[in-house]
Amino acid sequence: MIKITQTSGDALTLCEVETYGEKVTISEPQLIDSDDRQASQSSTPYNHGDAARAIDGNTANVYSQGSCTHTSDGSPQWWKVDLGAIYKVNKVVIYNRMECCGDRLDGAQVEAFSGSSLVKICGKIDYQSGKVSYTIECGDAIADIIKISQTSGKPLTLCEVETYGVKVE
């Protein structure tokens, strides 16, 4: 909407008003659920808990249900997903393991990358007993990779990682 007002008290006379511009479509951030996504992690002990489990669409939070990742212990441990395209990343939602070991996420850092370059440290997880998921805001970071890293020396276990954003065309 274009509004033209006259504040001096005089009459407003217009003979022609032309406006120019481009149509802008504003998209709301959506769950990035592309078949192009590929996950990897620093280690996978005994071939259990591989990285792809965190992007399988299943938020089951008990390890024996087969939907949680698991790295070895030692520092640093990390998990990352290549989104398959460039996105404005709004937020990352991480589902924690609940039957045990939930405190392994305490202090885990969520980072947004463009290629191999760090774009933004989105934030860290402040573990709370009994909390099922953590939402970390990324502030529309332009990225194609999301990485979660842990330097506590404990294994990193993730039961689902949801990334929300808008594809950059």
Image (cartoon, rainbow, N blue to C red):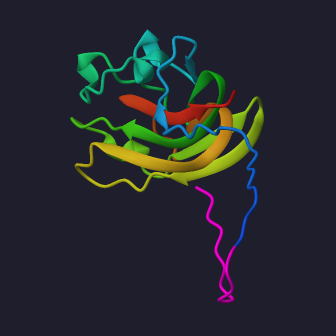
Pinpoint residue 166: horizontal percent, then vertical percent: 57, 34
Number of marks in the rendered image: 0
Q: Quadrant of residue 41?
A: top right
Pinpoint residue 110: horizontal percent, then vertical percent: 56, 44
Near-viewer residue (89 or 74): 89
Is residue 105 visible in this depiction of the protein? yes
Rendered residue at 55%/19% (across/down): 39
Pinpoint residue 44: horizontal percent, then vertical percent: 50, 18
Up/down of 70 relative to 142, above or below: above
Left or right of 162: which side holds 142? Answer: right
Rendered residue at 39%/17% (across/down): 56
Q: Which residues are magenta?
A: 1-12
Image quarter where the C terminus lies is: top right
Up/down of 161 relative to 6, above or below: above
Up/down of 150 relative to 39, above or below: below
Answer whether residue 9 is magenta in the image: yes
Image quarter where the N terminus lies is: bottom right
Rendered residue at 24%/27% (across/down): 62
Left or right of 89: which side holds 105? Answer: left
